[in-house]
Image (cartoon, coloured by chain):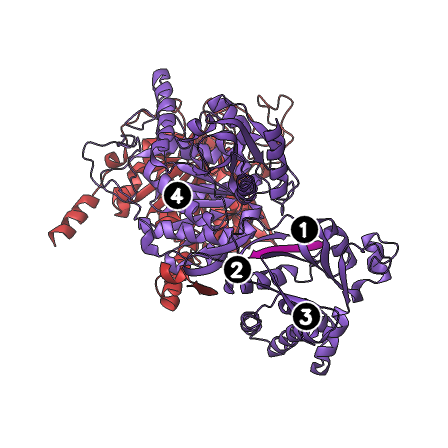
Amino acid sequence: MEKEVQVLEDVTIRFAGDSGDGMQLTGTQFTNVSAMMGNDLATLPDFPAEIRAPIGTLYGVSGFQVHIGSGKIHTPGDHSDVLVAMNPAALKVNLRELDTNGIIIANEDQFTEKNLKYAGYEVSPLEDNSLIKYRVFKIRITHLTGLALEDLKLPTKTVDRCKNFFALGLIFWLFSRDSEPTIAWIKDKFKKTPELVEANIRALKAGYNYGVITEAFQSKYEISSAQLPKGKYRNITGNTAMAIGLVTAAQKAGLELFLGSYPITPASDILHDLSKLKNFGVKTFQAEDEIAAIASAIGASFAGDLGMTTTSGPGVSLKGEAIGYAVMTELPLVIVNIQRGGPSTGLPTKTEQSDLNQAIYGRHGEAPLPVIAPATPSDCFIMAFEACRLAIKYMTPVIILSDGYLANGSEPWKIPSPSDFPEIKVEFLTEKNGKLPYSRNEFNARPWIKPGTPNLEHRIGGIEKANISGNISYDPENHHNMVYLRKAKIENIANDIVPAELFGNETGDVLVVGWGSTYGAIRKAVELQQSAGKKVSHLHLRHLYPMAKNVESLLKGFKKVLVPEMNTGQLAGLLRSDFLVPTIQLNKVYGQPFKASEITKKIDEVLRG
Amino acid sequence: MSEVLNKIESIKLTAKDFTSDQDVRWCPGCGDYAILAVVQRTLPEFGIPRENFVFVSGIGCSSRFPYYMNTYGMHTIHGRATAFASGVKGANPDLSVWIVTGDGDALSIGGNHFIHIIRRNFDVNIILFNNEIYGLTKGQYSPTSEVGKVTKSSPYGSIDTPFKPTSVALGAEAGFVAIGIDRDTKHLQEMIRRSHKHKGTSFLEVYQNCVIFNDGTFSALTEKDTKQDSVLYLEHGKPLVYGKENDKGIIMDGLTPKVVSLADGKYSINDLAVHDEHAKDATWAHILSRMNRSADYPQPLGVLRDVERPTYEKGLVNQIELAKGKRGAGNLESLFNEGDVWENN
């Protein structure tokens, strides 16, 4: 039967199942194939902290949401249009995010009495008409996968593990995706076990063919490719972009990269990525703890490498003293904080942006340092480069605030050419030339002097430095001056950064100010307001400390300033205290990114007054 | 050629070349002075250009050490000198890296980093000044203070069980473990030489007298009338003999060392245990590390263990070289274009 083909502008699909069901993999495959077919997209992996939570439980549900389209995609989608639910728990957890009239593809085989009980259903929702608002497709995915693989005589457990590819195949058919990239991926991934190559490809094809032959689906869909600027693209997560950005900066500076790091969710992938890049001269040091991680990085910077450390909020808490030491000793250092829900252990796998105050203020004494934040997954590349530039030029530690959503989320990245990026100038002092360890150049930076350089032997440390000589000093006036010198050095960076990005007019009724990963949701909401004729603009801050020089006048050009944040108002407070501007807050600490609709609604409210 | 000669010429250094222009601020009579002088006197022997030395310390009295050395130096934060030093050595394996620390710095706040640098076996030298007290914070008990010690923070006596730094180091897979003392500078100098010679982490514990807060704690080991009966100087391949008249020795009773007299004719020197620094298994060194004056043993001084194994930084460099050989030197263009790439026309 020839099926009707509908063309969609965009669609949001959520794959959900047990944490061992391979939903992250399934979602990633769908994402990559869609990217290669030219769609713009944004993704939201959403998984529990437990590695293999007990099967069938609500808290063990792992989800992956992907939003693809033929226009510019800013967010992973407020709601999903399609929910693939591999068991009752997955259905229950994700149903509230499914649009009315949305499609549910449920693996009927898993709706057993036991699993229904785990999910808290008394009666199967597939049977009691409770899903009447949706288009439900009950499919015996486990059973059909088994049939497709029957003659391979594989153990039941192995067959069972292929069912996610059946589901993926069906979704490929439904949204007219090309299976070939995934087939190639399977061949590579399982090349050591040919029987798994065969099994997974069969499952994928069986799912696809099920779509072709079943009468259940009346229509299938197409999403045209997006009008992205010309060029080469790849899909990239924030953490991978970060790792590549750090390596690029080190190469452009002609320095060896030394990463001291301790594994922590959601930052570990940067350590994994960088540890593969040893052929770039990258040294990765998996330290015994967070403190050793940063301490080794500072030691490496002292010795002439570009030292860096990657972590999340709990790690930054532990590193606080050492960050202050790097401020005092004025050595280049990059600290990457992939923020997660806090305080304490908090929500390790969920996103939040509640470490802004910690980044700016979280050290004893007056310890200023630049704080910057990427806006999107691919922007992590740019901000990683920027952090290294600032760290080297100004001889200072720099904090990058990414978050769990940016780290694991992905988007198409227009691949730049390495030649697009300038060299980062590094000048090691090799001759005295009248200079001392704490002499300063036109940027207030002190010279970087590597051990091994004759006649420039000197000692650094955490005790206050005498201006210029760098010897220890307890002189009251000297301490006062040094505190202000360090502060002036960092504040002066405001003259050396790009203006904050403004979308819309420079004056108007509402300025929505954001930082970090709220970029996409704010942009979409502001676009909607602007197309409705509202005088609303979006100001996005990538440099949080110091801020770009255009921020103050822009804040003062609007009747109202709205600050949406995934915290209880940290940037809002900063803007108030720095610029004496009243700020209206929109705060959410659900461990989930903002929906564009939530921001739109708030803007409406603010506009109404 | 003249450049080479100049280089060699410049390596002829003296203790003075290693003395910085900073005033030494330890208390008069502090054991640290002697250790500083020995180090400054010994470094010129190594033929290493002065600029290739880096002294790294944590916090505490001993940790002011780098300021007094006219070399590169990092006075870091409490307990973390070993971690900072790991980065220094990792970044530039050509440097001669020395860590100066104390019993509080290395074993209390820095205990974690202490065991891990030893386990990894960076080729660095740790000198731990053990005065069995907290000096810079003005007299609290330390992890090496004896049970019952009355200090400012233990007015009723310390209830903390101390541990032996050398035992901890051996437990952390140390390849080189030695003990010296501030008052025997000739022996200490030899220990510094041996530390330097060992490729891998060397751990040298130095008993050091704190004149203010723990004066005389090592006096049995240093005073003329008690010294010879209290100290056992270890020498590789030699029997464990000590005493004023060389009349005492150590025999092994199973795995337990036992003090015996050589005077009464019951035991001869041939019955004594013989020291083996290079014993592959660390058990022997561990037995020596457990002998201490509070348990009626003589205090062994000298090299307990000297066994080499591959260093961490060598492994690090090898992996980089291997990766470069296998995949070619890193190329950003191909890194950017890894994975599934598509073109939008």
Q: Earlier in the sequence, mark 2 or mark 3?
A: 2
The amino acid beneath tag 4 is Glu
Tell me the SS state at disc 2. loop
Q: Does mark 1 fall on the same chain as mark 3?
A: yes
Numbered disc 3: what chain?
A: A
Examine the residues drawn in magenta and state their main secondary structure. Answer: strand
Residue annotated with mark 3:
A166
Image-based side of B126 in relation to A94, left or right = left
Q: Which mark is residue A39?
A: 2
Q: Quadrant of residue B326?
A: bottom left
Tell me the SS state at disc 4. helix
Residue annotated with mark 4:
A386
Image-based side of A441 in relation to B211, left or right = left
**Up-down relation of residue B30 to residue B320 (above or below):** above
Residue annotated with mark 1:
A48
Residue neighbourhood size for the residue with mark 1, other residues' Cα within 10 Å, grouped as few (<14), some (14–19), many (≥20): some
